[in-house]
Image (tube, rainbow, N blue to C red):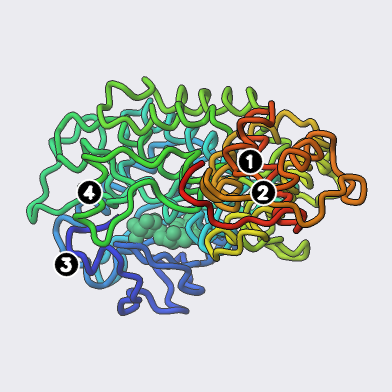
Amino acid sequence: MVLADPSVLTSTVPSAPVLTVGAVLSDTYRVVRSLAEGGMGAVYEAEHLRLGRRVAIKVLRDEFRRHPDALARFRREAETVGQLNNPHIVQVFDVHETAAGDPYFVMEFLEGESLASRLHRDGRLAMADALLITSQLASGLASAHQQGVVHRDLKPENVFLVTVPDRPVFAKILDFGIASARHDRPRVTRDNELLGTPEYMAPEQVHGTHAADHRVDQFSLAVVFYEMVTGSVPFKGEDAMAILYRVVHEEPVPLTKASPWVPAVFDAVLARALAKDPTQRFPSVSQFSWALENAARHVGVSRTKRALPSDVPHATEHVTPPSSPTSLRPTPARDPHQEQVRILERAGRLYDNAVASLKGDQLDDAVYAAEKLFDLAVHHRDAGLYELMGRAMPTLDLIFEQRLGPPTTRLSCVDCDPRRLNLTPNAARLLAIVDGGASVADVLAGSGMPRRDTVRMLAGLLRRGALRASPGTGRA
Ligand SMILES: Nc1ncnc2c1ncn2[C@@H]1O[C@H](COP(=O)(O)OP(=O)(O)O)[C@@H](O)[C@H]1O
Ligand SMILES: [Mg+2]
């Protein structure tokens, strides 16, 4: 949860501790250690003295302890979560006050890490994990909505990934600090605070309209899904105002543009959940989640079997060591789709290399990686790989076109012996056209192949040194 004060928007500076390690609260809970601080609260691990059970205790951070609105919201948070009962929502057991009069509440102790810290470490998640987490969050949100509760601040900091042995991932929603219940009066705070987090806020939340209902959570969940898959949020900006402007006025970069490896079927689903007008979104968060699952089935991505890694290109491949206690990844050896995953990951690395080389103006390296990617697609006639190739095509075309140059470029043979070069019949025919000298336009006109294939092959021949290019005269 955040307030309008920009320093609070990004504040991770620890505040003065509210609870002291070793202190016993209400004769029952001994404070063991500080766990984390969010925008408003500080969370501690504690031990229930009679039951010997670990619990988590949340108090308001020092700077908000005397803030009447914050205090009122904090008390309401405890009541709100207390009513909800869903495995994907953190459980609240009890509400108390410390001897100093500070309210605190007692929750189940969760072991694992927040989605924010996971994303911080891994950059992005495999598509299968992103789908599973989204469906779990949708389940938690749907049950809150049924009780008339809207979370209004769903974001990675407020999602906890619980480590459960032998389960790939188990997500819980935290922090109902600015949740609204159906019976709440319109949410105008005394200080005109902005309640929510700009990157994850729905447009109607920015406007502060009273019509902001359960559909704001669908919008935020879509932003979280987008971030899990691409590693970055759809609306970015230098400051809160710039982000809010984009949330309200600008269309997000389509998912598949942000990450060319994401199958195209996800674009339409995301675009609908991120619609500016809430009436254009899915009627419920569950329907959004089902639409994602349908899209996943359509392209053979399973949210449980982890058939495909997400958007494959991982710049630096991150592999969680198997001994890591927070590892949520099953051991690869047991994955029945291991081979397919391996191919797609290889495709991702090749694509990454191609893009990096293009950016670094290393065109031959870019062509090499792009050619290898084509070979991979041809050899493994895999539907998922084709779908992914389709997304990468504009970039690959650009690489080949750039290597080849404009239509006026003159081509000549350096080595025109097709047998020595071990060429395909089509590439050999291109060499025969060039033999003796020709412009790129001549070859394109005479190849009898689609332009795209001709360009790719010529770029490949240039890379291998079979052809040489020199600037043309200006006539094609
Ligand atoms: N029950 C819990 N068990 C373990 N860690 C928790 C628990 N609840 C919260 N946390 C940790 O504390 C952080 C802040 O909690 P949150 O409820 O979001 O506070 P705030 O309202 O200040 O944002 C979370 O991101 C999470 O890392
Ligand atoms: Mg929080």
Q: Residue at x 72, y 28 (%)?
A: 383
List the residue tagged with mark 4. 244
List the residue tagged with mark 2. 459
**First-in-chain label (4 vs 1):** 4
Q: Which mark is residue 455?
A: 1
Asked which secondary structure carries label 2, the reply is helix
- Split into quadrants, the picture shows ligand 2 in the one at bottom left
Asked which secondary structure carries label 3, the reply is loop
Q: Residue at x 84, y 38 (%)?
A: 424
Amino acid tagged 1: Val
Q: CA distance from mark 4 to mark 2?
A: 44 Å
Label 1 close to label 3 by CB (< 8 Å): no
Q: Nearer the viewer, mark 4 or mark 3?
A: 4
Q: Residue 286: where, in percent of width, then height?
A: 46, 25
- Between 294 and 408, the one lying in front of the other is 408
Q: How many marks?
A: 4
Q: Residue 112: where, in percent of width, then height?
A: 59, 59
List the residue tagged with mark 3. 66
Amino acid tagged 3: Arg
* Drawn side of residue 199 relative to residue 384, left or right: left
- Quarter of the figure with residue 396: top right
Amino acid tagged 4: Leu
Label 2 close to label 1 by CB (< 8 Å): yes
Q: CA distance from mark 1 to mark 3?
A: 69 Å
